[in-house]
Amino acid sequence: MNILIVCSGNVSRSFMAEMLLRNETEQLKLDNISISSAGLFAYPGSPPDPKMVEYLSAMGVSIKGHEARQITKDDVDWADLILVMEAEHAAMIERLWPEVKGKVELLGKYVSEGQTVVDDIPDPFGKSSYHYRLAQAQITLAIRGFVKKVLLDQR
């Protein structure tokens, strides 16, 4: 399974989600999963957000030389599943590449089991520590929920 995680700039949310998901799949020895991330408005080559790096480091998650990337047609063709942070991201991807309808999902739907309302995961970049803590908690819970509900159920 090829999983593409998308946000705006590919330095905070999708970067963090990619690193967490890589860590989870490595620990569970799920070697049939490929993970990548990109941004809709990325400045290619930008380094990851230091606040997200600090959070991941504190969790013991290794950070592999990440540089922001702009999403491409090749990315969406490669992906079996595209996880986005906001409904607007999904809409934009589906406008750019209508053929991907059906393989784009909000990551927020995995925050808690059985939830009926799916929230966006707001961009914390440049905002207060509260916004970072909120995004970090949402992404962490969503990745754990995704692994449990999607990846482990496929075994």
Image (cartoon, helix red, strand yellow):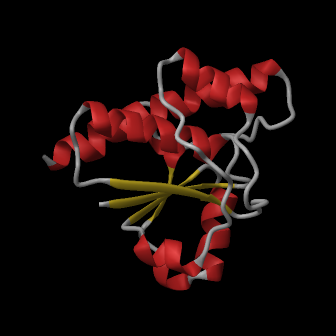
Query: For the point 64% across and 57% down, which residue is it?
Result: 87
**Residue 30 left/right relative to 20:** left
In this view, which residue lies farthest toward the top?
58
Asked whether 58 or 3 is in front, the reply is 58
Query: For the point 21% across and 38% down, which residue is it?
Result: 29
In this view, which residue lies farthest toward the left?
155
Which quadrant of the structure image shows residue 151?
Answer: top left
Q: As displayed, is residue 20 above or below residue 109? A: above
**Residue 26 left/right relative to 76:** left
Question: Where the N terminus falls, by quadrant?
Answer: bottom left
**Residue 28 left/right relative to 16:** left
Whether residue 117 is visible here, answered yes or no, is no
Q: Position of residue 108 (x, y in %)?
A: 53, 42
Q: Position of residue 117 (x, y in %)?
A: 53, 41
Q: Position of residue 50 (x, y in %)?
A: 74, 30
Which quadrant of the structure image shows residue 78?
Answer: bottom left
Query: For the point 73% across and 56% down, which residue is it?
Result: 45
In this view, which residue lies farthest toward the front?
65
Number of marks = 0
Whether residue 53 is visible here, answered yes or no, is yes
Q: As displayed, is residue 153 above or below residue 52? A: below
Q: As displayed, is residue 131 above or below residue 96? A: above
Query: For the point 85% across and 23% down, which residue is it?
Result: 128
Q: Position of residue 132 (x, y in %)?
A: 72, 26
Q: As displayed, is residue 71 above or below residue 51? A: below
